[in-house]
Image: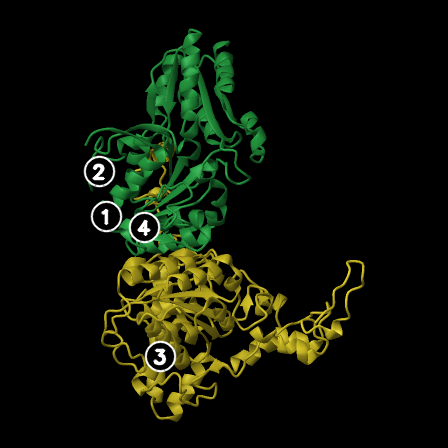
Chain colours: A green, B yellow
């Protein structure tokens, strides 16, 4: 098939459709995912084509969505549950941490838990409270879960299919601010996974988006375009940035990051999530452990503040943006 | 009809307001307590119906061992069935007592006794067909017994060598779920899957439910989930009932109301009898004498058949009593009166079957002796197995966290192995 240009939301839709066509056990469930096609239209048209036994409009209860998905997975289904917004996942947090993450361990492998929990995450859309959060660190702290975040249409498609094919539960973060941004999509770029394929699939590894020599900048999800813009701006000032998209947040794939730092000696980690006890903190710690003698400057972080997510009229002050990233780049270069 | 009144006017006298009754009778008629802030004793009693026996209780075998048929739940008893139910209850009680003893002797970290709930569990467990699926809480040793889980497989959880010692897929008995109420949603999802799979409503052979025969016949399936009176306050139980109703899921909500959630009496959980809550979700509820194994068997068999035939969900409240502590770490003398336990001893689930068997000549002393010997042998096997259970190896800690490889965890496992290898004895423990 040829490459087309499409939005990230439509790429996710195509990924879901492809997975549902390949495997009759794949079912989609959540609030408004049926007739409406989801509030972001990610599930648009799926109920019409696959029926209401495979695309379930559920009662409005997030613990109920995830808790029943657990039972469906035990029954042999591969549920793809949608949480409508990041800030609504917390009623389901009990089921995710107490059951989803632990059932395979508890039952010594008798029951795998093939489930995807899709969560639109991040700010920058001028929304009311609870619609712009970045809760990924909570999930990375739970053994038994996998956590990934996509940042462009091709990855959205590949990573969603890989997550659905995975026998472990995957928390799948979607950069809601980028849902309508377009990019290339070739559905056949990576063939679907079959049993016995080596793990992990290529799309579940961190990737160097842009090679550079002076400073390594790392992020995931919505901030990736910010990093690209920063690399352009830095280039104009004579600095070469190496840009890395983490893609997988648990487990972290820090091999490309450490390799890059051994070359650049400088690292800036970027995330919208609050800074303390976060993914950015973990990356700083582990790079220090593994590449201490390569570092020419402290690892700096550009992250959200440790406040509740602010009212949207000041969210531009909260979010990592081009200037904040360049400021951090300047600081690590100044050492 | 109230006249228009300005915001500055005083509130109308309540005597004229049907929603603010002034008499105890009126209050009780609304099932309410304390509408005026300080309840009268009558209102308190009206509000505590959840704690008392009532005429709504389905009972087939009285505490005195007298069998009375129930028109809604026709049931043919045979000596063979009664003897096997008796045997199950005695054996389960025996290893349950051994579990308590093993904890007191330091062989178990904790034990969760089922004493007093043998009928509620054996009745429900024996009502299931092999293809049905059960989701227990953590006290369902009797249901485990009925599902073919060997009692020794329960020990690891309480000795600390595993989190689930049986295969939940093969036994169709899920792992014990300790977070109160979580399993109700998991069971509902499983039942939704049964419905999507089309394994209900075929009305195949064996869906009669009135006798001991035909248990294994038919291809239709159902799910049953066990939870306690305390769990009914959890959001997950509410959501499970909402989802089950929304998707017509073939699930039996089996609430063992043993009157106590550790130290909190059921009155703290509900003003109305728990079974009545089902009405609010739009499916039937039945309160059964949870110390009557025949009633529990008959009502659960009916409820499972309802679910199999597509008429689910159904709620059952098994009205019973936790004769022992919440766990071996608990001390019930701090919160309940010994007289209450004495009262419930008269309602013992095993004694009434024994009396009936003896009085009707359905079992002789040799039978009772045989069961007693078998129970002691089981307890001895249970004990021997327990004290010989080895400490798990460090690899156990890292095993089965994921189904697919996980690079981060593999690195930590290597790190731990290298740490252990640094000791002179190679880390042997």
Cα–Cα gap, marks 3 and 4: 48 Å
**Residue A309 % position (x, y):** 55, 35
The residue that disc 4 covers is A47
Disc nearest the viewer among 4 and 2: 4
Lower position in the chain sequence, tag 1 or tag 4: 1
Residue A75 numbered tag = none
Q: Which chain is mark 3 on?
A: B
Q: Which chain is mark 4 on?
A: A
Cα–Cα gap, marks 1 and 4: 15 Å
The residue that disc 2 covers is A192
Question: Does B111 appear above or below A246?
Answer: below
Q: Secondary structure at mark 4?
A: helix
Front position in the image: B223 or B278:
B278
Cα–Cα gap, marks 1 and 2: 11 Å
Q: Confirm whether circles 1 and 2 share one chain.
A: yes
The residue that disc 3 covers is B85
Could you classify mark 2 by the number of other residues whose Cα lies within 10 Å: few (under 14), some (14-19), or many (20 or more)? some
Disc nearest the viewer among 1 and 4: 4
Could you classify mark 4 by the number of other residues whose Cα lies within 10 Å: few (under 14), some (14-19), or many (20 or more)? many
Instruction: Kindly indicate the quadrant of the structure image that contains residue A228.
Output: top left
Whether tag 4 and tag 2 are in contact, CB under 8 A, the answer is no
The residue that disc 1 covers is A23
Q: Which chain is mark 2 on?
A: A
């Amino acid at each position: 098939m040829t490459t087309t240009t499409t939005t990230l939301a439509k790429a996710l839709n195509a990924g879901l459709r492809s997975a549902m066509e390949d495997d009759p056990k794949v079912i989609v469930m959540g609030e408004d995912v049926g007739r409406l096609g989801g509030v972001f239209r990610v599930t648009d048209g799926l109920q019409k084509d696959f029926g209401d036994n495979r695309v379930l409009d559920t009662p409005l209860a997030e613990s109920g969505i995830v808790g029943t998905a657990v039972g469906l997975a035990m029954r042999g289904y591969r549920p793809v549950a949608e949480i409508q917004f990041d800030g609504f996942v917390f009623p389901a947090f009990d089921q995710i941490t107490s059951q989803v993450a632990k059932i395979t361990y508890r039952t010594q492998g008798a029951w795998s838990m093939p489930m995807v929990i899709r969560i639109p995450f991040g700010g920058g859309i001028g929304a009311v409270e609870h619609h712009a959060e970045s809760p990924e660190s909570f999930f990375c702290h739970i053994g038994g879960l996998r956590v990934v975040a996509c940042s462009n249409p091709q990855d959205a498609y590949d990573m969603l299919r890989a997550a659905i094919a995975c026998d472990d539960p995957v928390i799948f973060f979607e950069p809601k601010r980028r849902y309508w941004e377009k990019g290339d999509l070739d559905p056949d770029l990576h063939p679907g996974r079959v049993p016995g394929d080596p793990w992990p699939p290529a799309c579940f590894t961190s990737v160097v988006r842009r090679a550079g020599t002076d400073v390594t900048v790392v992020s995931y999800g919505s901030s990736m375009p910010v990093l690209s813009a920063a690399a352009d701006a830095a280039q104009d000032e004579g600095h070469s940035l190496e840009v890395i998209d983490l893609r997988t947040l648990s487990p972290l794939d820090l091999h490309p990051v450490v390799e890059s730092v051994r070359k650049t000696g400088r690292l800036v980690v970027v995330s919208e999530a609050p800074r303390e006890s976060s993914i950015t903190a973990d990356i700083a710690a582990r790079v220090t452990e593994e590449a201490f003698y390569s570092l020419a400057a402290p690892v700096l972080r550009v992250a959200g503040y440790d406040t509740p997510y602010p009212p949207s009229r000041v969210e531009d002050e909260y979010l990592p943006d081009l200037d904040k990233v360049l400021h951090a780049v300047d600081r690590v270069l100044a050492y | 009809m109230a006249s228009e009144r300005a915001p500055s006017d005083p509130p109308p006298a309540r005597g004229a307001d049907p929603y603010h009754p002034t008499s105890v009778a009126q209050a009780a008629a609304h099932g309410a307590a304390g509408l005026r802030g300080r309840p009268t004793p009558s209102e308190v009693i009206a509000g505590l119906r959840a704690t008392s026996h009532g005429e709504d209780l389905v009972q087939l075998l009285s505490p005195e061992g007298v069998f009375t048929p129930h028109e809604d739940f026709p049931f043919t008893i045979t000596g063979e069935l009664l003897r096997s139910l008796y045997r199950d209850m005695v054996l389960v009680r025996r290893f349950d007592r051994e579990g308590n003893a093993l904890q007191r002797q330091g062989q178990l970290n904790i034990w969760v006794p089922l004493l007093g709930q043998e009928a509620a569990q054996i009745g429900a467990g024996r009502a299931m067909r092999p293809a049905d699926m059960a989701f227990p809480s953590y006290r369902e040793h009797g249901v485990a017994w009925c599902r073919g889980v060997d009692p020794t497989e329960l020990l690891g959880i309480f000795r600390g060598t595993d989190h689930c010692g049986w295969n939940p897929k093969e036994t169709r008995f899920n792992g014990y779920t300790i977070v109160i109420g979580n399993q109700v949603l998991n069971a509902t999802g499983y039942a939704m899957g049964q419905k999507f799979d089309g394994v209900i409503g075929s009305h195949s052979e064996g869906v009669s439910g009135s006798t001991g025969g035909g248990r294994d016949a038919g291809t239709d399936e159902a799910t049953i989930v066990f939870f306690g009176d305390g769990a009914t306050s959890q959001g997950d139980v509410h959501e499970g009932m909402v989802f089950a109703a929304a998707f017509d899921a073939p699930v039996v909500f089996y609430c063992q109301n043993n009157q106590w959630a550790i130290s909190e009496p059921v009155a703290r959980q509900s003003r109305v009898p728990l079974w009545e809550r089902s009405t609010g979700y739009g499916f039937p509820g039945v309160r059964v004498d949870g110390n009557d194994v025949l009633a529990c068997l008959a009502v659960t068999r009916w409820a499972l058949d309802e679910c199999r035939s597509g008429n689910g969900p159904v709620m059952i409240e098994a009205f019973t009593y936790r004769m022992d502590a919440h766990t071996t770490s608990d001390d019930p003398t701090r919160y309940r009166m010994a007289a209450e336990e004495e009262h419930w001893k008269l309602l013992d689930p095993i004694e009434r079957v024994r009396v009936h068997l003896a009085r009707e000549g359905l079992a002789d002393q040799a039978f009772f002796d045989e069961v007693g010997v078998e129970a002691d042998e089981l307890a001895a096997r249970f004990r021997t197995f327990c004290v010989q259970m080895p400490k798990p190896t460090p690899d156990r800690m890292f095993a089965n966290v994921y189904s697919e490889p996980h690079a981060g965890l593999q690195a930590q496992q290597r790190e731990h192995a290298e740490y252990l290898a640094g000791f002179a004895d190679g880390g042997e423990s």
